[in-house]
Image (cartoon, rainbow, N blue to C red):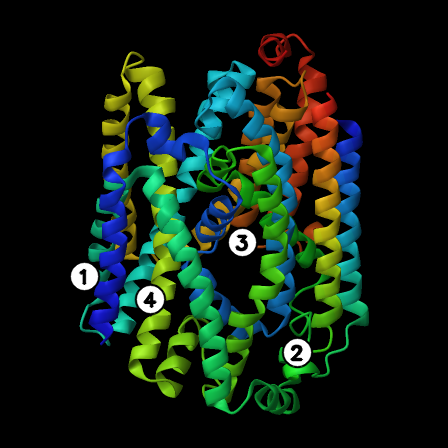
Amino acid sequence: MIRKGIFWVILFTAFAGAAVVYLMFFADDRPSFLGLPFWIFPFMLLHLGFTASVWAFTKWYWKEEKEE
Amino acid sequence: MTYLILLLYLGLTFFLGYFYTRRQTSAESFFLSNRNLKTAALFFTLIATNFSAFFFLGFAGEAYQLGYGYYAMMAFGTSFAGLTFYVIGNKAWHLGKRKGYMTPVEMVRGETNSDLLSIVFMLCMCLFMIPFLAVQAIGGGLILETMTDGQISYHLGIALMTVFIVVYVLMGGMRGIVIMDIKNGIIMLSLMVAAFVVLGYSIGGIESVNTLLYREKPELFDPTADGFYTPLKWVSFLLLWTTCFPVFPQIFMRFLMGRDLRSFKKTTVIYTIIPPLLFIVPVTIGVMGHIDFPALGPRESDGVLPMLLYKYTPGAFSALILTGALAAFMSTVDSILIAISSIGTRDVYLRYIRPEAGQKQQVLVARWIVVILAAVGLLMAWYRPGSIFTMVTVTFSGSALLFPVLVAVFYWKKVSALACTLALVSGEILLFSLTFSEEMPGWMGSALPVLPAFIWTSVMIVVFQLLLGHQSSEASSLNRA
C-alpha cells in the first residue's frame, strides 16, 4: 500500500511538475501545424507519456492485488 | 428543421427510456445497471457523465477569454483524473462486489461503522451537487432558447427539459441511462468534431485564422494565458480537477458498475487519452471567435460557439450541433439525479426510516427523490441567483475535500472515523472562510482556496488520528479486517 501511494505521488508530481515548468518557462508560442501554438505538441507528447505511466501503474497495481 | 432535429433526438431518447422500463426488476438494476458493464459502455457512460454542457459551451467561452492556455490546464487536469479514478475506483469496485455496497455513503459507513462520518460525507457529497444540477438546467434552457431563436423562452426551456429528463429517468433507471450515455457520448463527440471541421473550413481555414490571430492577439497563444496561470494557480486547478471528479456521486457510482476489473482498468487508461485530443476542438473554436466577435464580455463569450455556427453554417447544421450540447447536458443531469436518489433511498430511507423496505419500495422512493431533486434544481435555475457560478466553484472545491477522506477510509486500516469527520468539517470551514473572505491572505499567493484547504484536511486526518489515539479506530478497523 505504501509503495503504491509513493508511486502515485511520484507520478503525479513528476508529470504535473514537468508540465508546469515547460509551460511557464520553455513554451514556444509561435503557430505551427494548423496554426496552433507549437507548445501544444510537446505537451501532447507529455500526455502520452502520462497515459503510458497510468497503464503501467494499473498493470502493476492489478498484479499486486491479485497476488495479495 | 430545428424542431424536426430536436423532436428526432428527444423521440430517440424517450424510446430508449421506454424500452428499458420493462427491465427494471431490482434496486441493483435501477441503481447500478446490474454491475455488468464492459469497457466500451463504461467508458462512454463515464465520458458522457463527466463532460457536461460546459464542455460544449463553456470551454469555447473560457478559451475565448484565456486563449490556448485554457486548453493546457483543462486537458491535463481532466486527464489526471484517470489516475485518481483508478486509485479510488479499483478499491470501490472490490468492496462493492464483495460486500454489496451500492452507494459511496453506504461504503463509508460499512467500512468505518460510523453514522456520523457517513452523514457528514453524504451531506458534503449531495448538497454540493445541487447548484451543479441547477447550472446544467440553466445550460439546457439557454441551448433551447438559442436553438429556437427565442421561440422557446429560457423558462419554458428549463421546465420542458426538466420534465423530459425526469420522465425518462423514472422509466429507464440506470440501465436506461447507460444506454442513453452511449448514445449521447457518441453524438456529443462526433458533433463537436464536425463543428470544428465545418467551422474551420467556412471561416477560411484554421491555419490562416490562427496565423492572423497570432499577429493581432499573441497573448491568446501564451500558455500562461497572459500571466493568468501562475505556477501556484496551475497546481491548484490541477489538484481541483484531479480530486473532485472521482468523488462526484454520479462518477463514483460508475466505479461500481464494471463487470470485472479488467474492463475498469482499460476504461481509466483510455480516459486519460481523450481530454488532450478532444479539448483542443472547443478551445480552438473559442479562440477563432475573436475574428468576428473581437470584444465579448465573460457572459457573452459563453455563446461564442452558437454565434459562430449561426454566422457561418446553415441553420439545420447549427441546430444539429446544438443538439450535441443538449446531449451533453442531459447525460450529466440524469446521472446526478439517479446518483443522489440512490443515496437518499439507501442511506436515508432504508437506513433510518424503513429498514424493512423491499426492492420495489426502494425503487418507488428513489423515483420520488428524482422528482423532488429535479424540482429543486428547476427552482434554482428559474431564479438564477447571481452567485450561482461562484457557488459551483465552491461546491467543486468542497467536493474535492472528500478525496483525502475517502483515500484514508479505503487504504488506512487503522484510521478513525472521528479523525476523518473532524478533518473534513474543519477543512470545509477553512475553504468557505477563505472563499468568502473579502481579501485573500497574503500567504496564499495566487493559489485557489482549495489548495490550502485540501492540504489542511489531509494533514488533519493524521493529526486527529494521532491525538485521538487508536481507541476510536478499533471499531472501524474491525469492519475492514
- Please tell me which of labels 1 and 4 falls first in the chain: 1
B65 vs A16, nearest the viewer? A16
Find residue B143 and report its image quarter. bottom left
Circle 1 chain:
B
Position of B114 with respect to B18 (left or right) is: right
In the rendered image, which residue does mark 2 sit on? B221
Q: Are marks 4 and 3 on the same chain?
A: yes
Q: CA distance from mark 4 to mark 2?
A: 30 Å
Numbered label attached to residue B323: 4
Determine if residue B26 is in view.
yes
- Please tell me which of labels 3 and 2 falls first in the chain: 2
Helix, strand or loop under label 4:
helix
Numbered label attached to residue B156: 1
What's the residue at 46%, 88% (across, down)?
B202
Q: Amino acid at mark 3?
A: Glu
Circle 4 chain:
B
- Which one is in front in this view, the residue at disc 3 or the one at disc 2? 2
Determine if residue B375 is in view.
no
